């Protein structure tokens, strides 16, 4: 496992991400959840209302988790709103939500605002893995790009080291009718955690081109690329459809890696990330029962099987156990 990925994982209290997985497993095999994950055990006395406000990337997952959770607890009502990670901290602070799904970590100023209200910091729970994918139309011949090319395609500042702007598909080697096709850019708006993550990692904290067509959600990005032969965009792997290709990425001059589970676990794919749910948990006190049981379900074998069904990547049993320990 690469040190860079280890540092990322350690920084959020996660470690040994690849434990229990066979490193030599075929990348063509379907993703399977860790057999050592705990089954969810139903308890008595769970009822009431939960509100979730935050990430669009996690919107479908939160909805699927809520639907399955309510099968065990029909007296629970869960409302899901997914307009972007930046909406999660204010909703938690204002008390309009108890769950704050985010596809990025909270910024320092968001944590400070939370602490000013509650007197303690928010608790961050890792709930799934994602490979943030760069998508092209399924009929586009491009199969891979290096990070400096991705930066030169999306960014006007080119902090990734490219010598010149990339505006046509011919500039990355496509021939024939593709050579003079302008590249059509699709992305998220600034409320999105995916926007912030991509800006930081793919644009090296540079600035997006003004020509990026900002979309209100991840599904809209993928749909735009599906309907635009010259399109390219970025979104979580859970939104992949048959109309797009998730291309392999490389560091300049290095080997390109596909956005699959093994490459995320080993740190070879450059845009592997954790997805989070933030909660307000008083120090040395357990979470309220309804919130705790919902998150226990998310971190169980059943919850992580839903992660796989939604196209995302499951936590290992060891990582899930570390998250469960944060709930008490």
Image (cartoon, rainbow, N blue to C red):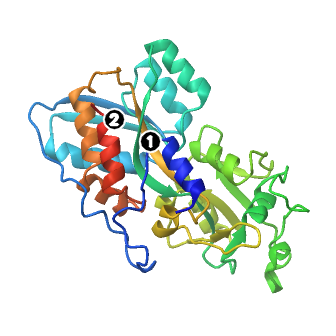
Residue at position x 25%, y 51% in the image: 300
Q: Does residue 106 appear left or right of residue 34 in this picture?
A: right
Residue at position x 71%, y 52% in the image: 213
**Badge 1 element:** loop
All told, the count of numbered labels is: 2
Residue 11 shows in the view? yes
Where is mark 2, residue-wise?
A: 326
In the rendering, at what x and y percent does residue 111 appear?
54, 25
**Badge 2 element:** loop
Q: Nearer the viewer, residue 147 or 10?
A: 10
| Up/down of 8 relative to 238, above or below | above
In the rendering, at what x and y percent does residue 259 appear?
54, 67
Going from the N terminus, do you reach mark 2 or mark 1 first?
A: 1
Q: Does residue 25 appear left or right of residue 38 in this picture?
A: right
Q: CA distance from mark 2 to mark 1?
A: 10 Å
In the rendering, at what x and y percent does residue 287 appear?
28, 27
The image's mark for residue 13 is 1
Q: Are marks 2 and 1 in contact (CB under 8 Å)?
A: yes
Q: Does residue 150 appear left or right of residue 9 in this picture?
A: right
Residue 56 shows in the view? no
Q: Residues within 10 Å of mark 2 (few under 14, many from 20)?
A: some
Residue at position x 78%, y 65% in the image: 149
Residue at position x 58%, y 66% in the image: 268
In the rendering, at what x and y percent does residue 248 appear?
62, 72
Q: Nearer the viewer, residue 14 or 144?
A: 14
Q: Residues within 10 Å of mark 1 (few under 14, many from 20)?
A: some
Residue 44 in which image quadrant: top left
């Amino acid at each position: 496992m690469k040190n860079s990925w280890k540092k990322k994982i350690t920084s959020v209290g996660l470690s040994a991400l690849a434990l229990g997985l066979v490193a030599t497993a075929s990348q063509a095999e379907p993703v399977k959840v860790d057999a050592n994950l705990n089954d969810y055990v139903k308890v008595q006395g769970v009822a009431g209302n939960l509100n979730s406000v935050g990430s669009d990337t996690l919107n479908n997952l939160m909805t699927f988790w809520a639907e399955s959770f309510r099968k065990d607890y029909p007296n629970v009502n869960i409302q899901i709103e997914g307009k972007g990670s930046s909406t999660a901290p204010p909703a938690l602070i204002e008390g309009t939500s108890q769950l704050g799904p985010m596809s990025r970590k909270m910024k320092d100023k968001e944590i400070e605002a939370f602490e000013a209200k509650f007197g303690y910091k928010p608790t961050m729970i890792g709930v799934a893995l994602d490979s943030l994918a760069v998508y092209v139309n399924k009929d586009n011949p491009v199969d891979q790009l290096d990070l400096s090319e991705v930066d030169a395609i999306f960014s006007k500042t080119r902090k990734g080291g490219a010598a010149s702007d990339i505006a046509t598909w011919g500039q990355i080697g496509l021939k024939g009718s593709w050579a003079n096709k302008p590249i059509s850019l699709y992305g998220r708006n600034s409320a999105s955690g995916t926007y912030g993550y991509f800006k930081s990692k793919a644009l090296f904290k540079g600035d997006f081109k003004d020509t990026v067509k900002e979309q209100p959600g991840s599904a809209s990005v993928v749909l735009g690329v599906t309907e635009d032969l010259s399109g390219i965009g970025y979104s979580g792997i859970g939104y992949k459809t048959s109309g797009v290709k998730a291309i392999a990425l490389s560091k300049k001059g290095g080997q390109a890696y596909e956005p699959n589970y093994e490459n995320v676990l080993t740190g070879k794919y450059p845009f592997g990330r954790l997805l989070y749910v933030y909660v307000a948990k008083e120090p040395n006190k357990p979470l309220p029962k309804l919130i705790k049981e919902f998150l226990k379900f998310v971190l169980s074998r059943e919850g992580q099987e839903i992660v796989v069904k939604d196209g995302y990547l499951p936590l290992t049993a060891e990582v899930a156990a570390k998250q469960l320990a944060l709930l008490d």
